[in-house]
Image (cartoon, rainbow, N blue to C red):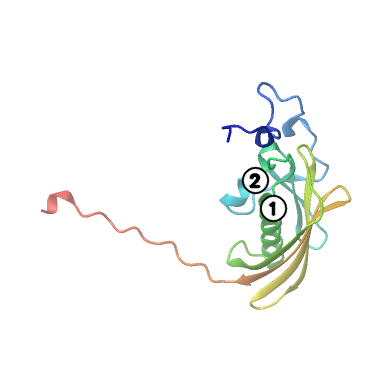
Amino acid sequence: MADNPAHLSAARPPAGPNTMSTPAELPIPEGFVPCSRGGPYFAALGPLYMKPTPEGGAVIALRVEYKHTNLAGMTHGGMLATLADGAFGINIAMLRKRHAGQVTVSLNMDYLSSAHQGDWLEAHVLVRRIGRQLAFAECLLKVEDRVVLRANAVFAFVTPRPAPTPTPAPDATDG
């Protein structure tokens, strides 16, 4: 087997400058501002943007970059799942008016289409119910009017654990 089979390298960008506009050169749609919500794993997808919704949540979005694609040149399914999961968490937290203390307990997805480098991809979340211990929501990932992914999720509310207290190292002179 060759070290670099043609079928595996076909989706990689050619060496040298990329001829496609970089996401930084493409406009951000009106009403979207940089998103500072979500944890460090979610932030790694970025840059991410958000736009408030009348219901008190937000549409979460990003410009698809090369780093978001698979070998076929379309958005990677794991990236789409991460975007939906993060958008669920942000919207539920916003509606609960809390920034922590919830975890995903169920996440179901149907991949209906794909997005490509340069596309503006939006996560539209509809929170169906927030109870004492659980929240139920639906999400559509869309490029314009085309649905790329349909998902539903259940989140459980938890009490965050306190940060562990570091144990001091023994003093080397204590013999």
Q: Nearer the viewer, residue 47 or 3?
A: 3
Q: Which mark is residue 45?
A: 2
Location of residue 137 with respect to 111 vertically, above or below: below
Give the residue drawn at x 66%, y 56%: 86
Q: Residue at x 89, y 50 (%)?
A: 145
Residue at the front extreme of this rendering: 1
| Three-letter amino acid code at the position of disc 1 | Leu
Q: Disc 1 on helix, strand or loop?
A: helix
Question: Does residue 167 appear left or right of residue 149 in this picture?
Answer: left
Report which residue position mark 1 lands on.
83
Q: Amino acid at mark 2?
A: Leu
Which image quadrant for residue 151? bottom right
Discs 2, 1 touching: Cβ within 8 Å: yes
Q: Quadrant of residue 15?
A: top right
Residue 25's disc is: none
Residue at the top extreme of this rendering: 16
Residue located 67% across and 49% down the image:
79
Indicate whether 3 appears above or below 131.
above
x and y percentages locating residue 52 in the rendered image: 78, 54
Query: Which residue is nearer to you in this view: 118 or 40?
Result: 118
Can residue 47 be seen here? no
Image quarter for residue 67? top right
Name the residue at the bottom extreme: 132
Residue 74: give x, y in percent of width and height.
75, 43
At mark 2, the secondary structure is loop
User: Residue lying farthest right?
Assistant: 145
**Residue positioned 63% across, 77% down in the render:** 133
Q: Position of residue 62 (x, y in %)?
A: 73, 44
Label 2 environment density (alpha carbons within 10 Å; few <14, some 14–19, many ≥20):
some
Q: Position of residue 103 (x, y in %)?
A: 60, 66
N-terminal label among 2 and 1: 2
Number of other residues with Cα within 10 Å of mark 1, as a class: few under 14, some 14 to 19, many 20 or more: many
